[in-house]
């Protein structure tokens, strides 16, 4: 209650700084929880889909099974590559899958991979911004609070604790709020970045495996 009273009685500029920091903190936590669910679902479904893909020798059957794993980025790659293979087969059924036609499948896989990477990296920039900017916003509030404290000293011509303490306390609150917003954002950003890199590596390996299977099944 004392802390809340201190914030309410704080300088208007300190209050604005705290409002900005609260916004960053709340929004970053929303991103953290949302990203956690997204990446957890993507990793879990990728493992299940890979088992289906590696056990089956029929791409058509894999395509039917893939509908159960919509949150899996590998499914998007598979469907793009499979649809391109189906198109090439229908356009010229007698012609084998040459290196030129295989490159067409590879381009479809690359486009799908880029789309999935964009989805995985969505809002990561906000976490990075929060982690890098909020400490400086808090520091700015700290400097302002100290300036307010010195102004009060000048007005009343006294450096007693009762005069200095409120301004210093406001400054420390701004510092704490900046760190409270920044630390979870930095930790989450580094953790999720590592998981996204793992998924990207998995997608690259899957693309190579898909091209190898396509060449074996449809090649000359």
Image (tube, grey):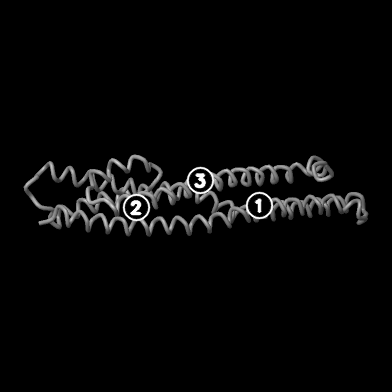
| x then y, percent, for residue 183 | 63, 56
Q: Is residue 180 left or right of residue 154?
A: left
| Nearer-the-camera pick, 49 or 110 | 49
Label 1 or label 3, whichever lies nearer to me, is 3
Q: Is residue 25 left or right of residue 70?
A: right
What secondary structure is found at the residue carrying circle 3? Answer: helix
Residues under labels 1 and 3: Cα distance? Answer: 29 Å
| Nearer-the-camera pick, 63 or 141 | 63
| x then y, percent, for residue 65 | 31, 42
Can you identify the residue that label 3 sits on?
37
| x then y, percent, for residue 154 | 87, 53
| Nearer-the-camera pick, 95 or 128 | 95
Residue found 15% across the figure and 57% down from its top: 99
Can you identify the residue that label 2 sits on?
51
What secondary structure is found at the residue carrying circle 2? Answer: helix
Label 2 or label 1, whichever lies nearer to me, is 2
Q: Which quadrant holds the N terminus? A: top right
Q: Residues within 10 Å of mark 3 (few under 14, many from 20)?
A: few
What secondary structure is found at the residue carrying circle 1? Answer: helix
Q: Outermost residue toward the left?
A: 94
Residue found 41% across the figure and 43% down from its top: 71
Which of the 4 quarters of the picture holds residue 211? bottom left
Mark 2 / mark 3, whichever is N-terminal: 3
Q: Are marks 1 and 3 in contact (CB under 8 Å)?
A: no
Residues under labels 2 and 3: Cα distance? Answer: 22 Å
Q: Are marks 2 and 3 in contact (CB under 8 Å)?
A: no
Residues under labels 2 and 1: Cα distance? Answer: 48 Å
Q: Which mark is residue 137?
A: 1
Residue found 35% across the figure and 49% down from its top: 49
Mark 1 / mark 3, whichever is N-terminal: 3
């Amino acid at each position: 209650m004392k802390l809340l009273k201190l914030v309410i009685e704080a300088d208007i500029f300190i209050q604005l700084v705290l409002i900005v920091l609260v916004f960053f903190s709340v929004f970053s936590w929303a991103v953290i929880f949302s990203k956690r669910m997204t990446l957890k679902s993507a990793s879990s479904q990728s493992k299940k889909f890979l088992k289906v893909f590696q056990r089956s020798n029929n791409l058509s059957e894999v395509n039917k099974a893939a509908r159960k794993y919509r949150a899996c980025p590998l499914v998007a790659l598979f469907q793009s590559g499979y649809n391109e293979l189906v198109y090439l087969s229908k356009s010229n059924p007698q012609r084998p899958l040459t290196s030129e036609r295989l490159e067409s499948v590879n381009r479809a896989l690359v486009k799908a991979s880029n789309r999935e990477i964009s989805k995985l990296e969505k809002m990561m920039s906000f976490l990075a911004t929060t982690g890098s900017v909020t400490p400086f916003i808090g520091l700015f509030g700290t400097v302002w609070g100290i300036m307010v404290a010195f102004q009060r000293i000048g007005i009343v011509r006294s450096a007693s604790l009762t005069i200095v303490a409120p301004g210093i306390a406001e400054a420390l609150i701004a510092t704490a709020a900046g760190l409270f917003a920044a630390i979870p954002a930095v930790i989450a950003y580094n953790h999720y970045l590592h998981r996204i890199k793992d998924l990207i590596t998995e997608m690259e390996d899957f693309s190579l495996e898909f091209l190898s299977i396509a060449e074996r099944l449809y090649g000359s």
